[in-house]
Amino acid sequence: MTKYLIEVFWSDEDQGFIAIAPDLPGCSAFGETAAKAVRELEDAQSAWIEACQSSGDSIPAPTAKARHAA
């Protein structure tokens, strides 16, 4: 699978971590820890790409770049 940038942040509302793939609109995942959110996002990315392939839509190339490293 192509590597996409993953952003992870804490959500007070959800009381957990949210991971998103900015290049894949709507692709996100939740986890009680940052690591769990990333693992869940890996599954979500696979499903997102599979859905694109099934519907005949093109799969976006990775374009997002990290803006800040903690």
Image (tube, rainbow, N blue to C red):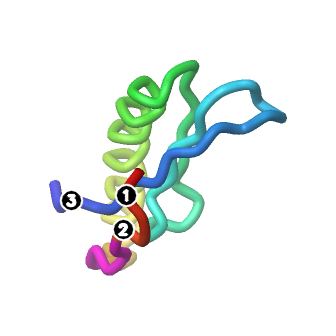
How packed is label 2: few (under 14 Cα within 10 Å), some, or many (20 or more)?
A: few
Nearer mark to the viewer, of 3 and 2: 2
Which of the two discs, 3 and 2, labels the residue nearer the N terminus?
3
Residue 69: mark in rendering = 1
Which of the 4 quarters of the picture holds residue 43? Answer: top left
In the image, which residues are magenta?
Answer: 61-65
> Circle 1 sits in a helix, a strand or a loop, which is it?
loop
The answer to whether the residues at label 2 and label 1 have Cβ atoms under 8 Å apart is yes
> Circle 3 sits in a helix, a strand or a loop, which is it?
loop
Dominant secondary-structure state across the stretch colored magenta:
loop
Q: CA distance from mark 2 to mark 1?
A: 7 Å
**Which residue matches tag 2?**
66
Give residue 26's position: percent from left, percent from top.
59, 59
Nearer mark to the viewer, of 2 and 1: 1
Residue 3: mark in rendering = 3
Give residue 62's position: percent from left, percent from top.
28, 74
Position of 27 compared to 60: left or right? right
Looking at the rendered structure, the kind of residue marked 3 is Lys
Residue found at x 58% / y 44%: 9
